[in-house]
Amino acid sequence: MWGMLIFAWFALASVNIISFGLGMMMPGIISEFGVDPAAIGQVVGFASWVQVLSLIPLSILLARRNPRYTVPLIMIGMVAGFTVVGMAQTLTMFYVGYILFAPFSANLVATLLVGAKLRGVPPQQMVQVNGIENFAQPTGQVAALLLIPVLVGAFGTWRSVFATVAIAVAVGLIVYFFIWGDGKRINYGQTETPPPDNAPKTSPFAALKEAASSRVVWLTGLAWPGTTIVWIAMFLYWPTYAITTLGVPLAHAGTVLAMIPLFSAVASLVAPTIAKKVGYDKPFICSWGLLLPIFYFMMTVVTSLPLLFMFSAMAGFGAYFFVPLAFTNVYKIGLSKAAVSISTGIILTFVLVGVAIAGNVVGGLTRAVGVQNALRIACLTPLWFGALTLFLPELGYKKMMALQAASEKGKAS
């Protein structure tokens, strides 16, 4: 199982290089196609709506298939889309390529991995594994922000980024099929074959109904765009603001912005340990709704590079600290395995709604009030996240241990 998970996490990192490096490539794309930042934001928004409409249906369609086969299929779709974008000679072909790989998203990969994790990961280790998975995505974002200036400088075009990532993913596919393609090296726990699953099978539509009836799923999903909107807006539009308004070189802008995913990766790894030692999850989820607006807003106010580094790092740490905790909640509320997978898909669909809003609405605001003011308005959106997550139940370590003890006491009596 670990081989398949590592391969899937590589896919997550790869697609994040493109998704979160687009802002760094935007000056070159704008110059070549003669458009403004809002036009590129619109294609991101439209592609995100495609993902919103396709994620749940694709999750239901592929949920019962072995992720050992479905994840490589998704990566083939990524390679095709990256190739079309990298070769696009017109803005229309750029749009077509970007929309082509939209359904084959990191969110679909993450949704399909739920079943594999439920089969092969002990419940007490789930939050740590989710932390590692969440670590993979900001790792790709860091790579994007640090490597894109190097690639563009070396090859003189943003197209080199799409070509490099497409080649890397294709090589990853080849390595995967040679090493794990026969399934002999995919272990589930301590055995060579998946452990027997005696639980009754849940139909996809019954799982969808079960997931949709959960208050935790809806609260988490509806809250999430509050952090996604400003997060995506920063990746898309802050480099242009830094270059045009602050006069910061592209490489320096990328280094400042790289602090967000770099410290997001750190937060993903340390959050499970800290929350477990404290024994409570909820304060580490909802409190960021109040802190993130301050950190992001300061990135649109200060002009000192050291201060920009500091606030970018603080924003990045807060933007991901709650992620492994919030996603693991759906594993703790008694849903069937199929419903957990669909629940993850529902939450990720709302994440994509936030991406679409960042592309379309914030993109439109850049035309109406300018990039700096548009970013400042977006900085308010985490307040929505904080307000809704206040109504989540506490599902931290102490609570779960108390429930387990009560359950064992009831069985004993």
Image: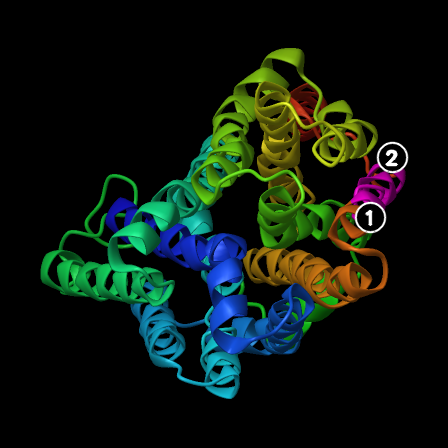
- Residue count near mark 2 (Cα–Cα under 10 Å), binned few <14, some 14–19, many ≥20: some
Amino acid on which the number 2 mark rests in the picture: Leu
Which of these two is toward me, 33 or 230? Answer: 33
Is 190 displayed left or right of 12 in the figure? left
Image spot of residue 280 (x, y percent):
71, 20
Which of these two is toward me, 210 or 174? Answer: 174
Which of these two is toward me, 19 or 60? Answer: 19
Image spot of residue 400 (x, y percent):
67, 27
Q: Residue at x 79, y 42 (%)?
A: 379
Label of residue 373 in the image: 1
Image spot of residue 86 (x, y percent):
35, 73
Callout 1 secondary element:
helix
User: In which quadrant is the C terminus drawn?
Assistant: top right
Callout 2 secondary element:
loop
Amino acid on which the number 1 mark rests in the picture: Asn
Label 1 and label 2: CA atoms lie apart by 29 Å
The residue segment tinted magenta is 376-388
Q: With respect to residue 84, does 163 lie above or below?
A: above
Does residue 63 appear in this view?
A: no
Q: Residue at x 68, y 29 (%)?
A: 407
Image spot of residue 141 (x, y percent):
46, 45
Q: Residue at x 52, y 79 (%)?
A: 99
Q: Indicate the quadrant where residue 67 lies.
A: bottom left
Magenta region includes residue 83: no
Is 303 displayed left or right of 72 in the figure? right
Label of residue 223 in the image: none
Q: With respect to residue 174, does 153 lie above or below?
A: above
Q: Indicate the quadrant where residue 23 lies.
A: bottom right
Q: Which residue is mark 2?
A: 390
